[in-house]
Image (cartoon, helix red, strand yellow):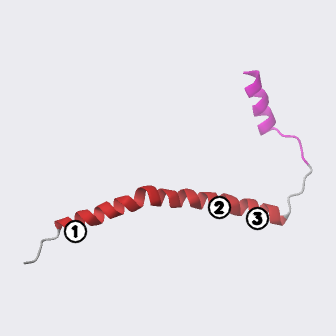
Amino acid sequence: MQLINLLAILIFFPNLAYAYIGPGLGLGAILTALTFLGLIILAFFGIIFYPLKKFYKKLLKDKKPKKN
């Protein structure tokens, strides 16, 4: 329990680092985060949405009356 409290204190109340993050590193970190978010969204559409769309199209195709 003391370890968890110590980690919480270190995470939420850090000392000043006096470090400089340049524009290149900052922009790279932002783009990496956005890319990861985009990957999650694309995975959602690829795994869940696309098969449902395919199933829905097949369902509509089966409901159409056949012409003689």
Quarter of the image that includes the N terminus? top right
**In this image, 21 relative to 57: left or right?**
right
Q: CA distance from mark 1 to mark 3?
A: 48 Å
Quarter of the image that includes the C terminus? bottom left
Count of labels in the image: 3
SS label for mark 2: helix
In depth, the one of 3 and 43 nearer the eye is: 43
Range of the magenta residues?
1-17
In depth, the one of 12 and 61 nearer the eye is: 61
Q: Which mark is residue 27?
A: 3
**In this image, 31 relative to 15: left or right?**
left
Q: CA distance from mark 3 to mark 2?
A: 10 Å
Q: Earlier in the sequence, mark 3 or mark 2?
A: 3
Residue type highlighted by circle 1: Lys
Please name the residue shown 76% across and 25% down the image.
3
Counting from the top left corner in percent of width and height, residue 47 is at 45, 56
Residue type highlighted by circle 3: Leu
Counting from the top left corner in percent of width and height, residue 13 is at 81, 38
Q: Which residue is mark 2?
A: 34
Comparing labels 1 and 3, the label whose residue is closer to the camera: 1
Counting from the top left corner in percent of width and height, residue 51 is at 37, 59
Q: Is residue 4 above or below residue 24?
A: above
Q: Which residue is mark 1?
A: 61
Q: Earlier in the sequence, mark 2 or mark 1?
A: 2
